[in-house]
Amino acid sequence: MLRPSCGAEFIFFLEEKTMKEQLEQIRAAAKSALNHAGIEQEIEDLRVKYLGKKGELTAILKQMGSLSAEERPAMGQLVNDAKQELEALIATRKKDLKAAATELKLKAERIDITLPAKMRKQGHLHPLTGVTNDMIDIFRSMGFDVVDGPEVETDHYNFECLNVPADHPARDMQDTFYLAENLLLRTQTSAAQIRTMETRKPPIRVVCPGRVFRADEVDATHSPVFHQMEGLVVDKGITMCDLKGVLEQFAHEIYGPETKVKFRPSFFPFTEPSVEVDVTCSECGGSGCRICKGSGWIEILGAGMVHPRVLESCGIDPTVYSGFAFGIGLDRLTTTRHKISDIRSLFENDQRFLEQF
């Protein structure tokens, strides 16, 4: 009776020993493989291999049915211990690999703060804009306001109110961009002066900077799109002496106090009397050069006393009030101030040219 019993116990002992050995072998192999895994995907593959539904530890649990009821708890505890140990190792290895990857990334992306920073290019004002702003500052310092007007104007404001009759050459289609019979692109900013005189009562002191349009051929000194700044003063007792004083002050501010100013008689339909204004050449100082064509002078603007008909058309009594007006070509002023030989350079947006300013 004892021999069969001893034999049965011996068989259970051998099965238990075999399962323990298998468990130890699985544990050792899994730990070794996890410690040598180099990427997170390898760790995940090992987790499935050992702890998955069809994993090796699961296979050990399935063999426990051959053990006695007394031996199963002990063996089950060993399997659970092994499982927990491998799960902890897997979590640790994943954390270590993630930390190592982060460290490598930080090293690769490390910024050396001792190196000079990369300089970002900073834009600046266009030379034409800079000159316009300077002129606005000059005239504001003399008490002028800045007004604006539409670029698309009517024939009434662009010509009729400025004493330009219907048969005047400036109305020709070859000189003016007409959009409709009585609608056009303004040929001067004087239209803004008319609108100002219609809405304000004297005293009036304004400048009107802006873009104007004329059907000119493009060359080194002409463009169909260019810029003007026109000024207007209307008050009691305004004379040519006031006009001369304002324009001389302007010339000295722009070109320097040594600049001389010359007034020449001229004709404009909206002023009477009218003058052309020259200044000594900034290139040669008046001695004569290719810029001023040997004359020593450069024409910068036209001006004159506001024609009585213009005042009347705006509802201002010319027997009580008088005024003067002037118009300055901003493009020409910019080219002479910065010694630019070709007006087209102002509109071509060539960065190599603009970076000089």
Image: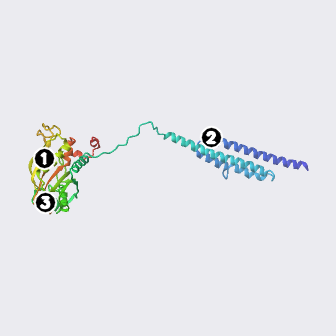
Q: Earlier in the sequence, mark 1 or mark 3?
A: 1
Task: State the image coordinates of residue 125 (x, y, percent, origin top left).
Answer: 28, 46
Q: Rounded to the nearest whole Å, what is the CA distance between mark 3 and mark 2?
A: 98 Å
Which residue is denoted by mark 1 in the rendering? 277
Q: Earlier in the sequence, mark 3 or mark 2?
A: 2
Picture quadrant where residue 305 is located: bottom left
Viewer-side label of 3, 2:
3
Q: Rounded to the nearest whole Å, what is the CA distance between mark 1 and mark 3?
A: 23 Å
| Residue type (three-letter) at the residue carrying disc 3 | Leu
| Residue type (three-letter) at the residue carrying disc 1 | Val
Q: Rounded to the nearest whole Å, what is the CA distance between mark 1 and mark 2?
A: 91 Å
Viewer-side label of 1, 3:
3
Query: In this view of the protein, can residue 226 be seen by the observer?
Result: no
Which residue is denoted by mark 3 in the rendering? 311
Which residue is denoted by mark 2 in the rendering? 36
- Residue 153 position (above or below residue 73): below
Task: Say which element carries label 3.
Answer: helix
* Mark drawn on residue 129: none
Q: Crowding at label 2, few (<14), some or many (≥20) Cα neighbours within 10 Å?
A: few
Viewer-side label of 1, 2:
1
Q: Residue at x 84, y 48 (%)?
A: 9
- Marks 3 and 2 close (CB-CB < 8 Å): no
Task: State the image coordinates of residue 73 (x, y, percent, origin top left).
Answer: 77, 51
Q: Which residue, as the protein is rendered here, is positioned at the far front?
A: 237
Task: Say which element carries label 2.
Answer: helix
* Residue 95 as seen in the image, left or right of residue 114: right
Q: Crowding at label 1, few (<14), some or many (≥20) Cα neighbours within 10 Å?
A: many
| Residue type (three-letter) at the residue carrying disc 2 | His
Picture quadrant where residue 101 is located: top right
Task: State the image coordinates of residue 5 (x, y, percent, origin top left).
Answer: 88, 50
Q: Residue at x 12, y 62 (%)?
A: 317
